[in-house]
Amino acid sequence: MIVLKTERELSVMREACKISAQALQLVGNAVEPGVTTAELDALAEKFIRSCGAVPNFKNYEGYPATACISINNEVIHGIPTSKRKICAGDIVSVDLGAKFNGYHGDNAATFACGDVSAEAKRLMDVTKESLYEGISAARPGSRIGDIGFAVQQYVEKRGFSVVRDFVGHGIGTEMHEPPEVPNFGTPGRGIRLLPGMTIAIEPMVNAGKYGVSVQPDGWTVLTKDGSLSAHFEHTVLITKDGPKIMTDPND
Ligand code: MF3
Ligand code: CO
């Protein structure tokens, strides 16, 4: 069932989202050559707990960390480890969230470590912009398919591809609530968006083909063709006046 959030619920959820956004920004600022993914994860966990919130990924279906940190051809769900150092030229996708007083925030971004290739830069820009295209389509009265269509069109016109096997989601008292929010779709299809819905829109975009595979660790998702991948995500509220990003660190 899709839950429409009350103003009282939203005020708590805004706090969870703000903490999530600030934690993401903190990690993004710490991306530099030589830092390990475990160090970045620890930074996020410490910050989230210092805000009186909890890292909502930790122990989610057995996931062992606060953040998912996925480098280059890793799409999502990379597990932080002290063995993995970030190198200059890497693109680093960080996905994390916080639960505060029973409500969840969830957001992701891909960061460049030092100078990255022109293709990597373009992939990051297109993926980020496709998220904003999707958010703009999330208006009351529109449908879920309108969001996916907006993302997909934007990405494919620029020669990249949208991952099909993982999608965005409703969010609230659970990190993953209905509806599913694919980053591909047909205009006018799917459930209708209503004020009070909160959804996480999260395009995963590959420089090559859209196929992905899961590593033997059971988590890390890789592009099948070895191409680079980027990921951006915001938690978004549908209001009567249009979409409102809840995970804006500057709010
Ligand atoms: N944050 C992911 C999402 O955007 C979920 C991560 S799964 C976890 O939906 F196990 F790592 F938490
Ligand atoms: Co999400």
Image (cartoon, rainbow, N blue to C red):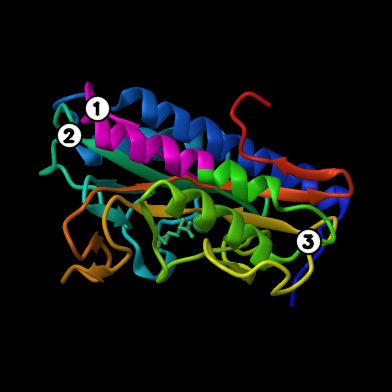
Mark 2 lies on residue: 86
Of tags 2 and 3, the one toward the viewer is 3
What SS does tag 1 mark?
Answer: loop
> Mark 3 belongs to which amino acid?
Ser
Q: Is residue 124 magenta?
A: yes
Mark 3 lies on residue: 142
In depth, the one of 235 and 51 nearer the eye is: 235
* Residue 78 shows up from this direction: no
The residues colored magenta run 107-129
Q: Residues within 10 Å of mark 3 (few under 14, many from 20)?
A: some
Q: Is residue 45 magenta?
A: no
Seen in the picture, residue 63 relative to 218 is either above or below; the reply is: above
Dot 3 or dot 1, earlier in sequence: 1
Seen in the picture, residue 49 relative to 99 is either above or below; the reply is: above
Left or right of 116 in this view: 191: right
Ligand 1 neighbours mark 2 (CB distance < 8 Å): no
**Is the C terminus in the top left, top right, bottom left or bottom right quadrant?**
top right
Point 81% across, 45% down: residue: 242
Point 23% across, 40% down: residue: 37
> Mark 2 belongs to which amino acid?
Ile
Provide residue 159's location: percent of width, then percent of height: 36, 50
Ligand 2 neighbours mark 3 (CB distance < 8 Å): no
Total of numbered circles in the picture? 3
Provide residue 52's location: percent of width, then percent of height: 58, 39
Mark 1 lies on residue: 113
Dot 2 or dot 3, earlier in sequence: 2
Dot 2 or dot 1, earlier in sequence: 2
Of tags 2 and 1, the one toward the viewer is 1
Provide residue 29's location: percent of width, then percent of height: 37, 23
